[in-house]
Image (cartoon, coloured by chain):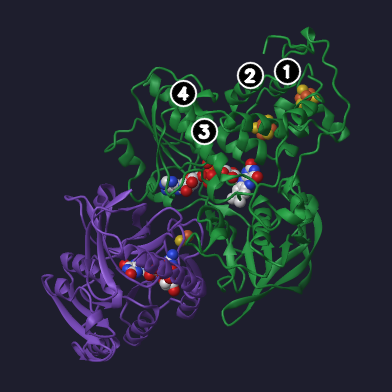
Chain colours: A purple, B green
Amino acid sequence: MFRIVHTRQISDAVFEMGVEAPRIARKAKAGQFLMVRVAEGGERIPLTFSDWSAEEDWIRFIYMRVGKTTHQLSHLSVGDELADVVGPLGTPTHVEGVGRVAVIGGGVGAAVAYPVARAMSAAGARVTVILGARNAELLVLEDELRALPGVTVNVVTDDGSAGEKGLVTAPLKRLCEAGALDHAFAVGPAIMMKFCAATTAEFGVPTTVSLNPIMVDGTGMCGACRVTIGDQIRFGCVDGPDFDGHLVNWEELMSRQRVYVDDERVADADYQRECSCHK
Amino acid sequence: MSQVDESGLSGQTPAEKPRHKPSRAPRTPMPERAAAVRRSDFEEVAFGYSAEQAQAEANRCLQCKNPTCEQGCPVNIRIKDFIAAIIDGEWTDGVEILKERNALPAVCGRVCPQEEQCEASCVLAKKGEPVAIGRLERFLGDHDLTCDLEHRCTPQIAEPSGKRCAVVGSGPAGLACAGELARLGHSVTVMESLHAPGGVLSYGIPEFRLPKAIVAAEIEMLEVMGVTIECDQVIGRIATVEDLMTEEGYDAVFIGSGAGLPVFLGIPGENLNGVYSANEFLTRVNLMRAYEFPTSDTPVWRGRKVAVVGGGNVAMDAARTALRLGAEEVFLAYRRTAEEMPARKEEVHHAIEEGVEFKMLCSPVEIRGRDGWVTGLVANRMELGEPDESGRRAPVCVMDADFEIECDTVISAVGTRANPLLHDAAPDLELNRRGYIVTDENGATNLPGVFAGGDIVTGAATVILAMGAGKKAAAGMHRWLTDA
Ligand SMILES: Cc1cc2nc3c(=O)[nH]c(=O)nc-3n(C[C@H](O)[C@H](O)[C@H](O)COP(=O)(O)OP(=O)(O)OC[C@H]3O[C@@H](n4cnc5c(N)ncnc54)[C@H](O)[C@@H]3O)c2cc1C
Ligand SMILES: Cc1cc2nc3c(=O)[nH]c(=O)nc-3n(C[C@H](O)[C@H](O)[C@H](O)COP(=O)(O)OP(=O)(O)OC[C@H]3O[C@@H](n4cnc5c(N)ncnc54)[C@H](O)[C@@H]3O)c2cc1C
Ligand code: SF4
Ligand code: SF4
Ligand code: FES
């Protein structure tokens, strides 16, 4: 069992949680993720490290409340326990020698963008963060990102309620046009990553994306997470989650992410009903 | 076992036991649930022998002077003697004999390919009706599991040696190794990457063939013997093998990580929604209990028409699982003929009884789809040609893309490989061309103090071979630990 040592509500649907996990905390690296199972009978869901401390024995992740498991998480508090936390999984993000880099975080993708931006700037990169969300309410980790030394932050919202109005691809395109980019790293909804990759492709700027296919074990034994990169099938959980954004088959990824939408609606509706009975 | 019961039978050598009159009755049938009933739930198919049935079957054994059956068992169980114990009604003696060589009799009695192993070598096999050794083994294994923990047959544990061993992976190889090391007095910690121990016994082989309660009870026994099992530990990520030996202070490490990486067919359409590897399909259903969804949280796509590709145990399990999830039709597409199928005969028979439709001599070339979802499987018509290096007649194509099986789900059960995480766990470990670990006859790898066994050494094989390898490596580790 893994004891919860920290919880924080970041916005209406976005939360942060910290759990005690000394062994994992010693090995975590930017871009890696965890598989979390709340309780017996629960689903295993992947969540990316947002932060960790080897000295204080904890790891943290930020999650958006979208379905049953993330709802359950949001109902837990400090002192409660999670049945399983497995990690660190996946290949760490490559941060060495990237020079001038744009780190694009869309929605809850900011949770992944944060440790990546931090690691890249620590490795000597000049980092511009482009933080996007539908509206000001849904922006996460802006203050934390601004507090990173040497990191510039551009905020973009769909409705203009904070920062620039529009999509993350607008400032990204400007950076490309100015010839001010050696590399881009994008994480967020698949559609956003797809358009980021399309934007940088025009300018030949190498682009890494952190993919989020559906996973079961997260250790390479089921193939649920397979994605097509160029003409090869790769496993998101062991070969990724980072891949060359210019080679990803986006239509396939987005289609595969939708396999269980109906089932998940059933599970979540059941759970909501149960919750309201107990209130 | 030395005492003689009223019938005058005993488990002694044949010379002292002239009065055992083998019965000439036909093989005692296994009581089973009717196919029509069992194909819609996940409860176990076979009930197991009653004591009377077990004794009736045991009585068929000739108690041969030269029990050839024992040579057919990869771990050389003293088959003749445990059968004699059943004849005598001495269940506990029988369990003890089994456990000398096999820590998981209730499992092996259910899943061993007996018709190729012990039963194939029974003298009665020549006439087509060998003694049902597997069913008798299951009978004793189950008997042991129904006893309270303190009355169950536990091996004598040697004095603590003061040595610490780490076992990576909790499949049959790791469990057998851990049990043996504990018996020899070493402190043992098993590290498993999933949230439940058992390896394929937990995530692969379905409930209706191997109830998870049996696996759990066998594992509980190991814990009683002092083995610590830590789940959620992915070796290669959370620690390397070297970390275990240095930072964490283990004196020896056993790697039994299995051959878990699914192989796909490599044909167009394989990433359509509705295409599963058998590993994913079975893991969702067994380990994550998707058949109880939405009571359990993990969903599985329940196809109406399901095509399973392959002819081994994994394919049979996937096909029969699909039926139980409510599929109207389940097809099994295999490149050769039923003769060549590597699956246990009993499972093939069960699958046919339950209504799985076999499409033989058919080799898939494309998965067709619409709007991202599977609509059919296109296959070549094959014919059996000359024998290949495996000695089996190789399938050759006689008609390109000859037919299409209409279906909404395709499950590929065409094999597995070594998981690449292994390389991260121990970069200097010597692997063969196919990525499996190279060991000597004691299970030792090229790294001092690091041993390995099971599917990760041989490639996908059987439960009993994995257990045998785990046990052999434990003996090698013991020598290494005590000589050093
Ligand atoms: C490598 C990786 C890292 C991720 N990191 C984060 C993160 O840091 N923060 C965060 O909020 N989310 C992250 N996600 C997405 C997160 O895993 C899903 O939001 C979560 O599984 C939803 O579970 P649920 O039961 O609440 O919702 P559900 O109702 O089960 O699902 C909602 C949506 O989430 C996706 N999803 C469901 N199950 C899985 C699964 N097992 N694996 C992947 N996606 C799934 C589906 O596309 C589904 O439409 C990550 C995903 C991956 C693959
Ligand atoms: C569906 C199916 C049906 C089968 N039916 C039969 C049958 O009827 N009869 C029969 O004899 N055989 C059968 N087999 C084959 C048999 O199950 C295997 O040969 C046997 O389980 C191999 O044992 P193992 O211990 O080597 O590996 P596994 O059982 O694969 O166990 C390996 C364990 O190691 C864990 N692991 C892997 N990597 C790591 C890591 N890096 N860190 C920590 N842990 C790790 C895995 O999660 C797993 O739990 C079947 C196999 C399958 C898949
Ligand atoms: S372990 Fe398997 S092969 Fe050996 S006797 Fe038992 S059933 Fe037969
Ligand atoms: S070979 Fe057959 S008949 Fe002979 S001892 Fe073995 S099981 Fe009995
Ligand atoms: S999630 Fe199972 S292989 Fe990646």
Do the numbered discs 1 and 2 sit on residues whose CB atoms are within 8 Å?
yes
Q: Please determine if labels 1 and 3 lie on a single subunit.
A: yes
Chain at numbered mark 1 = B
Which residue is found at the position 25% from the left and 78% from the top? Answer: A182
Q: Looking at the picture, which amino acid does disc 2 mark? A: Asp
The Cα atoms of the two marked residues, 2 and 3, are separated by: 21 Å
Which residue is most to the top? B16
| Relative image position of residue A84 (x, y in whole percent) | 37, 52
The Cα–Cα distance between marks 1 and 4, rounded to whole angstroms, is: 29 Å
Q: Which mark is residue B183?
A: 4
Q: Residue B176 carries which label?
A: 3
- The residue that mark 1 highlights is B88
* Cα distance in 3D space between marks 1 and 2: 10 Å
Q: Earlier in the sequence, mark 4 or mark 2?
A: 2
* 1 or 4: mark nearer the eye: 1
Amino acid type, mark 1: Asp
Find out whether the residues at labels 3 and 4 contact each other: C-beta distance under 8 Å: no
Distance of mark 3 from mark 4, alpha carbons? 11 Å
- The answer for how far apart the CA atoms under marks 4 and 2 are is 19 Å
Q: Is mark 3 on a helix, strand or loop?
A: helix
Residue for badge 2: B93
Q: Is disc 1 in contact with disc 3, using a CB cutoff of under 8 Å?
A: no
Q: How far apart are marks 1 and 3 (CA)?
A: 29 Å
Q: Do labels 4 and 2 share a chain?
A: yes
Earlier sequence position, callout 1 versus callout 2: 1
Question: Ligand 2 near label 3 (Cβ, under 8 Å)?
Answer: no
